[in-house]
Image (cartoon, grey):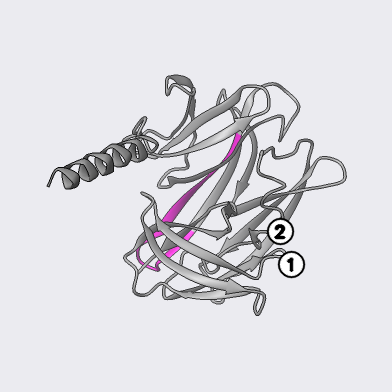
């Protein structure tokens, strides 16, 4: 009995040490949050506050650093914030970001989008009505901003691709690790999804298999699909999923692709 008590004490000790390595340090209530590395300002958190139409940035100790008020068209709501950066869209020293708002036609059941690029003062740098999806590619000089403008009011939906030259580059410390492990653009389509969705992807030549994972917005894993070089896209049935916003990405041997949002409608 004494030996069992000693063994139990040792197990509790190591369990306590193990659990201490995983520590909740803060909760951002009612908003979605992300973590970024700004080349000048350093590491920051930012949140998307739909109710207040804001992007708020926080320091590493979670104290408020900046608040950016976003202009949303009438009857639209804020649905995504991307590329919170410095010196990407222009060469001043202000924080910049791209954000998307959308409107849902409840009668005809389709979405209309609007994309804006603003700086930390809320000043609009560029406006792209109808644009819902964007991606930035590195170029020989600066970068190329690709913007996809969809019209879901017609069937089949139409798409136009706008290409812009911008002066800066997206900075991430993980660029070399996730090179060629990515969701191919323009990402999942049709998005919003009403029954099934097609997700293009690209894997490095040395990766035989990876996992495409679908999460709820609070981080709960919903589905996981094995993908390989046999195909360059995967069809995912969304009819069995509750309506709402999801996040999907590719995982392989500890490396992760960028995450993208997917809207499931009924």
- Magenta stretch: give its range: 97-111
Q: Which mark is residue 180?
A: 2
Relative vertical location of residue 212 with respect to residue 116 in this rendering, above or below: below
Residue located at (21% from left, 41% from top): 6
Mark count: 2
Residue 134 in picture, x, y percent from top left? 63, 51
Which type of secondary structure does the marked residue at label 2 adopt? loop
Residue 234 in picture, x, y percent from top left? 56, 74
Relative vertical location of residue 10 with respect to residue 253 in this rendering, above or below: above
Residue located at (48% from left, 24% from top): 60
Gap in angstroms between the C-alphas marked 2 and 1: 9 Å
Q: Which image quadrant for residue 232?
A: bottom right
Between discs 2 and 1, the one toward the N terminus: 2
| Residue that carries the numbered disc 1 in the rendered image | 205
Relative to 32, 114 lies left or right: right
Residue with the most extreme bottom position: 230
């Amino acid at each position: 009995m004494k030996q069992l008590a000693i063994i139990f004490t040792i197990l509790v000790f190591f369990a306590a040490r193990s659990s201490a390595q995983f520590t909740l340090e803060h909760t951002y209530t009612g908003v979605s949050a992300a973590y970024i590395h700004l080349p000048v300002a350093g590491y920051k958190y930012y949140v998307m506050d739909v109710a207040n139409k804001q992007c708020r940035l926080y320091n590493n100790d979670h104290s408020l650093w900046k608040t950016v008020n976003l202009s949303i068209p009438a009857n639209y709501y804020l649905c995504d914030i991307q590329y919170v950066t410095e010196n990407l869209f222009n060469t001043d020293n202000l924080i910049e970001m791209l954000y998307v708002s959308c409107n849902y036609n409840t009668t005809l059941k389709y979405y209309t989008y609007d994309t804006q690029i603003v700086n930390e003062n809320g000043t609009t740098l560029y406006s792209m009505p109808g644009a819902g999806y964007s991606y930035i590619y590195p170029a020989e000089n600066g970068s190329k901003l690709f913007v996809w403008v969809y019209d879901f009011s017609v069937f089949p939906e139409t798409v136009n691709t706008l290409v812009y030259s911008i002066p800066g580059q997206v900075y991430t410390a993980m660029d070399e690790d996730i090179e060629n492990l990515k969701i191919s653009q323009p990402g999942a389509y049709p998005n919003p999804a009403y029954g099934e969705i097609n997700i293009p992807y690209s894997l490095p030549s040395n990766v035989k298999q990876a996992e495409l994972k679908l999460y709820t917005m609070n981080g709960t894993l919903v589905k996981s699909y094995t993908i390989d070089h046999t195909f360059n896209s995967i069809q995912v049935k969304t009819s069995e999923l509750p309506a709402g916003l999801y996040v999907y990405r590719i995982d392989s041997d500890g490396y992760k692709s960028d995450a993208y949002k997917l809207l499931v409608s009924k």
